[in-house]
Amino acid sequence: MAVCSRQPGRCQPAPPPPLPPPQQQHVQHLSQQQADRRHVLALLATAGGAVALPAAAAGAPPVAPLPPLSVPALTETFLSPEGFAFNFPADWVVAFDRSGSSNDGAVIVVGDFRALITVSVFRTTNIPEAIVRAGLSEEAGYEICVGPQQQQGSTQRFELISSAMGPPAAGAEPGSPPAYEYEYSIESCVGEVEEGLGGVLRCIGPFGNLLPTQRRRHIGRCVLIGANAYSLNGSSPEDRWEQVGPILRAVVGTFRA
């Protein structure tokens, strides 16, 4: 970018902006990840608008959950030049691919958007040197791959379901590092989260109106590759998890470095 005076031909290159302090860099990294996750939610909202879901009648008995779908063949493979790979069904769509980027945030997003299920790989840079040397532990994996989701301003409710270290995926290269595995449920607000009477959290729109929230189940695996962490995260609406969860578990289970 150049700085120009009002006289023609008087442009000079602008000096580079000063580097932000480490704490501000961390905030910027979280902001990029939050923007990418909001992008994914927007894709889901757009896709969901094309699917007509019947409204439940007032006083109607609860609907029995749909039976789990059979897991299709995972015939497509995404092989990243950054050193990770995973498999997914042939009829899934690649929403975007940022393999050439180097900053924090989503690298690739694929999914069955009409069914509102997605799988995303997120890159996290600026990993502490001590973790890079020692490798991932359950505590470090949570801090890097799960903690930022709990801290997002759009998070209204967060429940950690499982958190543990797991073995390398089937098909991984010999000597591949173990992966941090996690599962959580999250309720997100597309507006502003406000605390009401009695500490009850509400999702408020731009005109003070009450907005519905989105409840999704997430499952993922996180690995270290060099000085970066990569987390493959699969998610679906909470009320569809029993139906599509086996498919997402199968895809997430193929994530390897």
Image: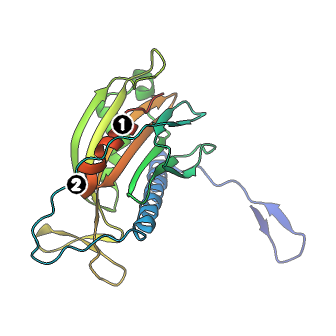
User: Which residue is under mark 2?
Assistant: 66
Q: Residue at x 72, y 56 (%)?
A: 15
At label 2, the amino acid type is Leu
Q: Residue furthest right?
A: 9
Q: How is the image coloured?
A: rainbow
Percent from the top left, x then y, of residue 103?
Answer: 56, 46
SS assignment at label 2: loop
Q: Nearer the viewer, residue 93 or 75?
A: 75
Residue at (13% x, 78% y) in the render: 58
Residue at the location (35% across, 50% down)? 235
Which type of secondary structure does the marked residue at label 1 adopt?
helix
What's the residue type where badge 1 is placed?
Ala
Give the residue pinned by disc 1. Answer: 250
- Say if 175 sits above or below 10 in the image: above
Q: Residues within 10 Å of mark 2 (few under 14, many from 20)?
A: few
The answer to which of marks 2 and 1 sits earlier in the sequence is 2
Q: Is residue 80 left or right of residue 87?
A: right
The residue furthest bottom is: 207
List x then y, in percent, for residue 51.
Answer: 39, 68
77 lies left or right of 16: left
Total number of numbered discs in the rendering: 2
On screen, residue 220 versus residue 15, left or right, reads left
Residue 55 location (% of width, % of height): 24, 74
